[in-house]
Image: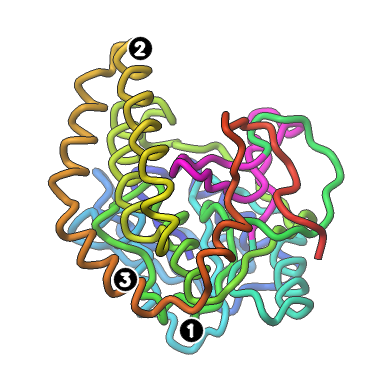
Amino acid sequence: MVVNWNSFDHLRRCLAALAGQTTPFAQVIVIDNASDAPPDHLDCPPGLENLRYIRRPDNAGFAGGNNFAFGQLADCAWIALVNPDAFLDPEWLRCMLGAAERHPDCASFASTLVSAAEPTLQDGVGDIYHASGLVWRNGHGQPRHDISEVEVFSPCAAAALYRRDALLSVDAFDEDFFCYVEDVDLGFRLRLAGHRAVLVPKAVAHHVGSATTGGKHSDFAVYHGHRNLVWAFVKNMPGALFWALLPLHLAMNLISVAGFALRGQGRVILRAKRDAIKGLPKMWRKRREIQAGRRVSPREIWRIIDKRLIPKRDRVGLSKEI
């Protein structure tokens, strides 16, 4: 399943990679989120005759586009999410489904993302959630090396596999997030519902990253990412951990504001935090519902989050091998 917005150059390579899987996809859906000049149809590469191309009249973001597509896949037990700027190695799906068989207690699986521009470097091997509420891709920018299957906090949805019934049980993506951190928010809610996530090292995807949003430091990315960090923490951090870690979360936000202001993005970071605060009543209502259905203790969340005083982005191997 691919959600596209103005990424047709990348999308052609993405679809060719989907067609080249040694284990074929049962269905492939492309949701176009009201691109500026979308074609009437997509040319199907050989081997992808099951492609469905659906054009939306509006841009619902990554979250809304995927949620719309979930409704088109009612007969699928597993759903793979693939960004148009993520290009899967031929064995990707076979490796993912093999991991799903080995770990029937897991609801989501992360793949090894490598840099499309420099394949010797990792783009990320699962997502890390820090005690402050900061998030990042594990091992981003580090040299590739052998990794065993390990538990991770959540997959990066640029190329990930999810169990459909688990997705729907937690109401899938939060469409208020639009894009950025929505996959970590989903992963957090899956964890609160008792599900785990596993990295599948042999499932490799070559990822460009932020191909249509101006890069990870663009105003668009900074706004949505830093607004959504607040909402994810407020909604999901359970019980006593919320109050114990709230001072650290506030400090992280203040440091972020100061840092982006020094980089000349003071207005956008302040707007992000202002809108995050304006959205708190709605997020607090969501929190009540999420926490009422929580099936794991705060201790389990404490186990899996990153607790270092100073976050470091070079960590690989978040949890023990499984």
The Cα–Cα distance between marks 3 and 2, rounded to whole angstroms, is: 37 Å
Tag 3's secondary structure?
helix
Label 1 SS:
helix
Q: Which mark is residue 165?
A: 1
Residue with the mark numbered 3:
68
Amino acid type of the residue tagged 3 in the rendering: Phe
The answer to which of marks 3 and 2 sits earlier in the sequence is 3
Q: Residue at x 73, y 54 (%)?
A: 319
Residues in magenta? 110-138
Local packing at callout 2 (Cα closer than 10 Å; few below 14, some 14-19, many 20+) is few
* Residue 35, horizontal then vertical, whole percent: 27, 48
Expressed as whole percent of the image width and height from the top left, the position of residue 201 reads 77, 54
Q: Nearer the viewer, residue 43 or 203?
A: 203
Read off the residue under disc 2: 263
Q: Secondary structure at mark 2?
A: loop
Q: Disc 3 versus disc 1: distance between alpha carbons?
A: 15 Å
Q: Residue at x 72, y 51 (%)?
A: 204
Amino acid, disc 2: Arg
Q: Is residue 162 left or right of residue 171?
A: right
Marks 1, 2: nearer the viewer: 2
Horizontal side, residue 79 vs residue 201: left or right: left
Tell me if mark 1 has few (under 14), some (14-19) or many (20+) residues whose alpha carbon lies within 10 angstroms of its own. some
Q: Earlier in the sequence, mark 3 or mark 1?
A: 3
Quadrant containing the C terminus is bottom right
- Magenta segment includes 135: yes
